[in-house]
Amino acid sequence: MSSNIAQLAVGATAIVPLVLLVLAGAVVLLLRRIVADDQDGHHHIAPELEVAYKAPPGKDSGLTVFYASQKGHGRRFAERLVASANAQGVSAAAVDLTGFDTDRLVEFQRTVFIVATYAGGSDVPGTEPFFNELTDMSRDFRVEKTLLASMSYAIFGCGNSEYPPKDFNAATRRLDRALRLLGARRLVPRREGDDADNALSEQFDEWAPSLWRALGRGADGSDGSSSREAPKRTAAQAPPLSQDL
Ligand SMILES: Cc1cc2nc3c(=O)[nH]c(=O)nc-3n(C[C@H](O)[C@H](O)[C@H](O)COP(=O)(O)O)c2cc1C
């Protein structure tokens, strides 16, 4: 019995150097890979991610109004915006972010996000995968910081200032930050809508004209030809939306 134990102990001692050798080999291979990446001047992205994160040339030239909404305010605002655009002959679509594949964001050029915040500053239930993945991408050193450079965006938040300041419109702020970190261009300042006085709808109607102007349209989404007000644009803003989008 004691001789068996002695034999086992000797066997285990012989395996230890072998395991150490294999581990050392793995470390050397890993270090060589990292050095090769740095010499290239950029970090490589894993091949499977490369496919997902490569920005294709813009496929969409209309206006896409993404929304995250549970009680329906955000969805209704999105539909209103789309209706104004369509009424002016501008192609536009409202897209629910519930279940939306984050990797597809690179396909969109002119976007609006109408986003509600829920308990404890959280995302609308069902939209967490989209927002979490976007935030992860914005922090991932392997994802190009120009990934969304061909995208311009505007954000209107649906929140309520009766919630603690850190939670008020928190989802909206996270989204804005992630989009900027990925190189997207902001069309107009983020508007943090406040439902506290039941005036969200009025706030949205106040905000929408600034968006249309940034897009080179009249305050109501028209092409501006019948409007007295000259469209205000800055160099950083997107070119006008044309009728034939
Ligand atoms: C259960 C619950 C939790 C909420 N939590 C927050 C919050 O943490 N921060 C915030 O700004 N608004 C919060 N709100 C307010 C909503 O965001 C606001 O009512 C918004 O207009 C809802 O938009 P929706 O109708 O598009 O879902 C909360 C509302 C409810 C009902």
Image (cartoon, rainbow, N blue to C red):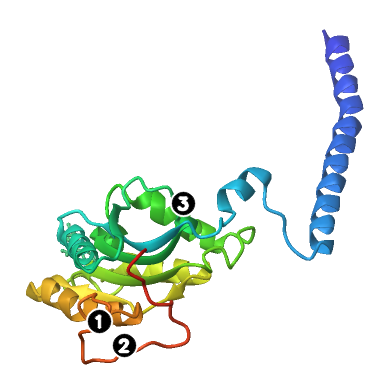
**CB atoms of marks 2 and 1 within 8 Å:** yes
Task: Say which of 245 and 44 sits in front.
Answer: 245
* Label 3 – label 2 distance at C-alpha: 31 Å
Q: Earlier in the sequence, mark 3 or mark 2?
A: 3
Q: Which residue is mark 2?
A: 231
Classify the position of the N terminus by image quarter: top right
Q: Position of residue 35 (x, y in %)?
A: 84, 58
Please give the name of the residue rendered at 29% of the width and 57% of the height, measured from the top-left corner: 93
Mark 3 — residue? 104
- The kind of residue tagged 2 is Pro
* Residue 21 marker: none
Q: Is residue 85 left or right of residue 236?
A: left
The crowding category of the residue bearing disc 2, from other C-alpha atoms within 10 Å (few below 14, some 14 to 19, many at least 20), is some
| Crowding at mark 1 (Cα within 10 Å: few <14, some 14-19, many 20+) | many
- Mark 1 lies on a secondary structure that is loop
- The picture quadrant where one finds residue 112 is bottom left
- Identified by mark 3, the residue type is Arg
- Toward which corner of the image does residue 198 lie, by quadrant? bottom left
Q: Residues within 10 Å of mark 3 (few under 14, many from 20)?
A: few
Question: What is the three-letter code of the residue carrying label 1?
Answer: Gly
Residue beneath disc 1: 218
Which x, y percent locates residue 176? 40, 70
The residue at 27%/71% (across/down) is 156
Q: Residue furthest top?
A: 1
Q: Specify whether 196 is left or right of 131.
A: left
Q: Who's the residue at 91% across and 33% down the image?
A: 17
Element type where label 2 sits in the image: loop
100 relative to 43 in the view: left or right:
left
Visible in this render: residue 66? no
